[in-house]
Each structure stands twice: as C-alpha cells, then as structure tokens.
Image (cartoon, rainbow, N blue to C red):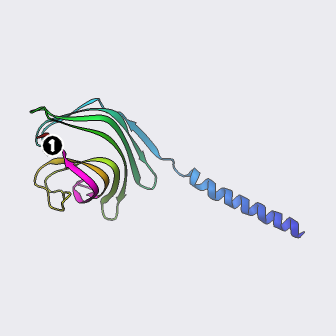
C-alpha cells in the first residue's frame, strides 16, 4: 500500500511538473519579422545628417516581439557604405548588433540596450552621448554597448551611455 501511495504521489508530481513545463510553451509565441532593405537608401538632409547621404548596403534585420513587451532586434549588414552626396566622402562599416528594448508604460519610456555596432541619430532637444542637450542633427556609429532611455511618445533620447567607442558619422563625411 505504501508503495502504491508513493507511486501515485510520484505520478502526481510528474503531472504537475509536466504542466509547469507546458505552461510557458503554451504562452503566446513571439512574432518575428525579417526585413531586407533596399540595397540603396537615400537619407535627405535633416534625417541623419545636415546634408544628403546615400547608403549602399547588403544585409537584413530581424525584429522579434515577445508577449512580455520586449522587442529584440538583430541586425547583420556587411559592406555598409555611407556617402555624402555633395562631396563624395565615404564612411564604411560592417554592422552587426543585438538590441533589446522594453516599453515601460507606467513612465511612458523605452529602456534599451544594444551591443555590437549601433547607429544612433540625435536631433535637437535629445540628450547626446556627452550628456548635453543636442542643438543639431547628427548620427553616431558606436562599437560596444549602448544603453538608452527614450520618451515613449516623442521618441526623444532622454539618456544614453556608451561603453566602448563612437564616431560622429556626419563629421566623418564632412
């Protein structure tokens, strides 16, 4: 009889464990979208730099949205070349990064972290990498880890921290 009770208890524990393992699997599956942009992109003055820039690229980006609110972005661009349309200067990178963003509805902000290679654009009113308020549009190429807080409504950069190095793309193309 004791052996039967132990077997029944063991079976009950096995069923409970199976249900605990199955519960997360039954949760909403993430949604992934893979995007391969046009091999040539044009960025008019005021959208990345104060002058027109054309980007030549090959690669893809995968966006995965999870039911808990996280969005994960994986970017793989090889031979990404940016050209100042006015003077022909180029800025060439191989661009691979992993980014995780989480929307904080209580405070209407997005907390994000990107590792690898990141292109980040600042517009007047954003907080820049040096902590000062930006007075002109520019874009940076960062290598390392970038953490940031962005306003959930206006998408203004409220804070940014870079562990690694960064280059002002617009200055490099000037």
**Circle 1 is placed at which residue position?**
172
Residue interval drawn in magenta: 148-169
Q: Nearer the viewer, residue 164 or 136?
A: 164
Looking at the rendering, in which quadrant would you find the C terminus?
A: top left
56 vs 31, left or right, is left
Residue at position x 77%, y 63% in the image: 10
Q: In which image quadrant can residue 101 be found?
A: bottom left
**Is 143 situated above or below 132?**
above
Count of numbered circles on the image? 1
Magenta stretch secondary structure, dominant: strand
Secondary structure of the residue carrying numbered label 1: helix
| Residue 167 % position (x, y) | 20, 48
Residue at position x 40%, y 37% in the image: 34
Residue at position x 34%, y 48% in the image: 116
142 vs 97, left or right, is left
**Is 168 situated above or below 51?**
below
């Amino acid at each position: 009889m004791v052996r039967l009770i132990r077997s029944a208890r063991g079976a009950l524990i096995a069923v409970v464990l199976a249900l605990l393992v199955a519960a997360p699997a039954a949760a909403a599956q993430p949604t992934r979208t893979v995007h391969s942009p046009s091999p040539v992109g044009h960025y008019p003055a005021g959208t990345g730099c104060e002058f027109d820039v054309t980007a030549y690229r090959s690669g893809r980006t995968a966006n995965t949205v999870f039911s808990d609110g996280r969005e994960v972005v994986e970017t793989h661009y090889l031979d990404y070349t940016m050209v100042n349309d006015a003077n022909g200067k180029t800025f060439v990178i191989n661009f691979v990064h992993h980014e995780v963003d989480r929307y904080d509805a209580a405070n209407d902000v997005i907390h994000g972290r990107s590792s690898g290679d990141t292109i980040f654009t600042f517009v007047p009113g954003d907080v820049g990498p040096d902590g000062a308020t930006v007075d002109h549009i520019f874009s940076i190429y960062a290598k390392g880890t970038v953490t940031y807080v962005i306003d959930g409504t206006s998408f203004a950069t409220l804070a940014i921290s870079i562990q690694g190095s960064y280059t002002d793309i617009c200055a490099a193309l000037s």
